[in-house]
Image (spheres, rainbow, N blue to C red):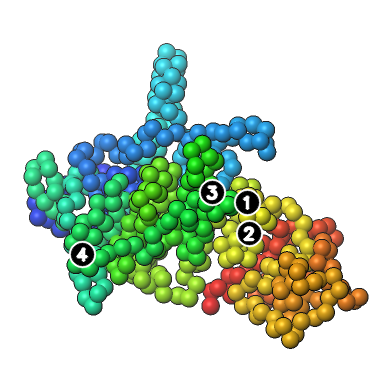
Amino acid sequence: MASSLTVRQLGILRPNHRETVFCQTLVVGNSVAAYTATLAILQAGGQVCWAQAGTSAGGEIWPRQSRSHPAESYFSWRLGRRISPWEAGTIMSESQQAFWTHWRSPSALHAASSSTSQSAPTAGAETARSQSKGGQFREAIAPYLQNQQLILIPQGLPIRVLYSQQRGQRRVHQVVFHDPTPHQQFQVHARLILDATTDARLQQDLVADAAAPLSPEHQLTVAEAIAHHRREARGYFFADSVALVMATGEPGGKPRPFSVPLRSLMLRNTEGFLTVSLPGCVPQLRPLFAHPRAQWALGEAAGQIAARAAQLGSIQALRQPTHWAWRLQQTLVRQGIPIFAFDDVALDDPDFEAIQMVAIADVVRTMRRRDLSFRPATPITKAVLASALARLPQSKVASPDDATALSDVTANHWAEQAIQTAISNHTLSPEPDTTFAPGKVLTKRQLWQVMQPLLPPAMTTPLYPLDDTPARRRHLSRSLYPILQSQLSE
């Protein structure tokens, strides 16, 4: 990965003066986002160089940014007890939940170590080591340092970003660092560079050096992010959303989730560069992204994106297919990263992936915009099924001339257009007495009869027991997901 490198123990490097390190992906920064981005790339099989942009000798490898932010519990009126933030499963990924679950505050670790020092000092020390942030961090990256899949450069401050430009398109390819201890410089050359510095230092350098104004592809606004302003339970959901962050619209208000689109991590007309720790946004939103759990979400998503881009050659190649965003979001969801916030669909729910992906495609979401509940056990009616079928990507909207007269579905019915579309597409039929029975609860057997012709031909095994018990919303999402995969893979 480099020429004439001085390699320290466990893959920690100190480049020589004017030396150039070559790598596939470069992560710059000592933030929580830098850690999670690096780890996500490694776990996806990628090769990465992590320049911590600091002055430590490699021993201080847990970002200071995270130290004063424990995961606070809160009281749930629905459950009647205090719960941890990861227990609700609203926005935290599987890896982040595992991290905070096993973490204990330094005072708690000291107490545990002291209480076991007389009887079992070795066990107490092992507990403290395994439950500290630094202990989890070192344990996670140790295998990658040993096999040199990860190259760690702990010393060196970024001073300049180098790029080439042709026909208005900028290609970032190198970062110059200054190592203050021996007063020398070195460069790291990479196909993709992730700016995970706490103050987006690399992006600032690019913007200052640009001959023309340089801005994110999308800049998040307060109206998009703050659910309080939207009078809804969540902020705006973007077609290319890749991460969830919590925000409070007013002092003392309840935090609500909002989505971060991939475009806010990218600069216009710029390839080979992702802004990880600080997405493009108005100044009022910047403090929201400084929270460690927000940093974790941003870094983890960016790491998965970087790994996928490395496989395809570039982020531009990743965004070329017609339905690239949905496919990318599927990759993230399969890594236990929620993209659409629900407070009643846990990460270990057997239908987590199906419910997430169907919601992302805007086929079946929440029943009410003012709460975060999916209600997977709620029975489905013919009207609900018609609404979902009408939202499928390849559904053809019914022409007014083809409308079927239904005595129980007026023009003011909330699903009237969807019902007419379902009838026109021959996916649902009226009742024999010229009614549609929109409120009729469907059984699982009836749901399967409707969905089976729409499924891929190879899928003949029922996705749930075929009986006369009510079909639930989870069964609907489970049935729709293979259809979406078939239609969005084209």
The earlier-in-sequence mark between 4 and 1 is 4
Relative horizontal placement of residue 100, taking residue 68 as reference (left or right):
right
Query: Mark 1, mark 3: which one is toward the viewer?
Result: 3
Distance, label 2 to label 3, CA atoms, is 19 Å
Nearest to the observer: residue 98 or residue 64: 64
The earlier-in-sequence mark between 4 and 3 is 4
Residue 305 is at least partly visible in this image:
no
- Depicted 369 relative to depicted 322: above or below: above
Query: Mark 4, mark 3: which one is toward the viewer?
Result: 3
> Whole-percent x and y of residue 7?
18, 47
The earlier-in-sequence mark between 2 and 1 is 2
> Whole-percent x and y of residue 339?
52, 56
Residue 19 is at least partly visible in this image:
yes
Distance, label 4 to label 1, CA atoms, is 43 Å
- Depicted 115 relative to depicted 25: above or below: above
Residue that protrudes farthest toward the top in the picture? 118
Element type at mark 4? loop
Classify 10 Å Cα crowding around label 1: few (below 14), some (14-19), many (20 and above): few
Q: Residue tagged by mark 1?
A: 370
Q: Residue tagged by mark 4?
A: 210
Residue that protrudes farthest toward the bottom in the picture? 401
Which numbered tag is attached to residue 44?
A: none
Distance, label 4 to label 2, CA atoms, is 42 Å
Q: Residue tagged by mark 2?
A: 365
Relative horizontal placement of residue 406, taking residue 204 as reference (left or right):
right
Classify 10 Å Cα crowding around label 3: few (below 14), some (14-19), many (20 and above): many
Q: Residue at x 57, y 45 (%)?
A: 89
Relative horizontal placement of residue 412, taking residue 270 as reference (left or right):
right
Q: Residue tagged by mark 3?
A: 228
Relative horizontal placement of residue 170, taking residue 133 as reference (left or right):
left
Q: Amino acid at mark 1?
A: Arg
